[in-house]
Amino acid sequence: MIGWLIAEAIENAVPGRRVVGLLSQTLVAADDHPTKFVGPAYLEAEARRLAARFA
């Protein structure tokens, strides 16, 4: 459902363009301790600023 919501929001923001949502899943072993984040990492001050902006 979240993929549909994101695709709808993008289609509404860009009229006349077709949008497709693709979700995937990754299996991680229980004993694996990943050291790389997926997506951006923010310092606390920047995270708070962004959270306030998009709240």
Image (cartoon, rainbow, N blue to C red):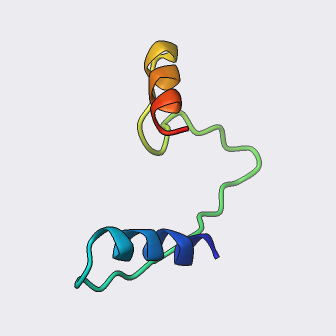
Most foreground residue, 22 or 14: 14
Q: Quadrant of residue 3?
A: bottom right
Question: As drawn, is 55 to the left or to the right of 20?
Answer: right
| Residue at x 26%, y 78% (from the top left corner) | 15
Q: Position of residue 29 (x, y in %)?
A: 70, 54
Residue drawn 48% across the image and 37% down it = 36
Q: Quadrant of the C terminus?
A: top right
Q: Is residue 34 above or below residue 24?
A: above
Position of residue 26 in the picture relative to residue 12 (left or right): right
Residue furthest to the left in view is: 16
Q: Tell how many labels.
A: 0
Quarter-of-image position of residue 16: bottom left
Q: Residue furthest right?
A: 30
Determine whether 15 is above or below 34 in the image. Answer: below
Task: Using the image, determine if residue 51 lies above or below residue 32.
Answer: above
The quadrant of the rendering that contains the N terminus is bottom right
Q: Is residue 7 above or below residue 33?
A: below
